[in-house]
Image (spheres, helix red, strand yellow):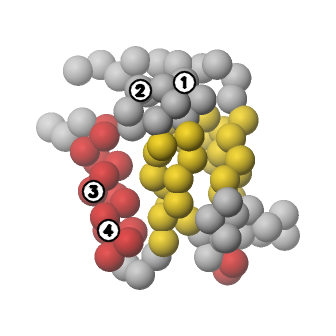
Amino acid sequence: MKTFKEEMKGYLKKWEASGNKVTSYVCQHCKKKIKTPQPTKKLVDSRGYWDSMKKCYECGGFNFVLIYPTGKTEVKTWGIKIKEKK
C-alpha cells in the first residue's frame, strides 16, 4: 500500500504529464515547500482562485490554501495537525 506522500507525488507527476502546471506553498506546520496543482483560468470561479484544504504530504498538517492561475498561493491555517497512521 502506498503512503499518502507516494500517492500525492504520483498524482502531481500525472498532472504535469497532462500538460498542467504545479506551484507550491509553504506548510505552516513543518515549513517545507509543498507542491500542489496550479489551476488554469478556466478552472477557477469568479473569485479568481481555487480554495482548498490541503493535507501536507510531509507532516500531515492541514493548510487552507488559495491557489491562483498565476502560481501565487496564500496559506491560511487553524493549527490542525493529524498524524497519518502507518
Query: Which badge, 1 or 4, comes first in the chain's sequence?
Result: 4
- Residue contact between numbered discs 1 and 4, judged by CB atoms under 8 Å: no
Q: Count how many numbered circles sit on residues in the image.
A: 4
Which residue shows up at 31% across the image and 52% down it? 9
Calculate the distance from the C-alpha at mark 3 to the C-alpha at mark 1.
Answer: 23 Å
Question: Looking at the picture, does residue 30 appear above or below residue 45?
Answer: above
- The residue singled out by tag 4 in the image is 14
Near-viewer residue (61 or 32): 32
Which residue shows up at 59% across the image and 29% down it? 28
- Badge number at residue 2: none
Calculate the distance from the C-alpha at mark 1 to the C-alpha at mark 4.
Answer: 27 Å
Q: Position of residue 13 (x, y in %)?
A: 31, 64
- Residue contact between numbered discs 3 and 4, judged by CB atoms under 8 Å: yes
- The residue singled out by tag 1 in the image is 29
Query: Which badge, 2 or 1, comes first in the chain's sequence?
Result: 1
Q: Position of residue 41 (x, y in %)?
A: 69, 78
Near-viewer residue (30 or 9): 30
Near-viewer residue (72 or 46): 72
Which residue shows up at 45% across the image and 52% down it? 35
- The residue singled out by tag 2 in the image is 59
In the displayed structure image, the side of residue 22 where residue 39 appears, left or right: right
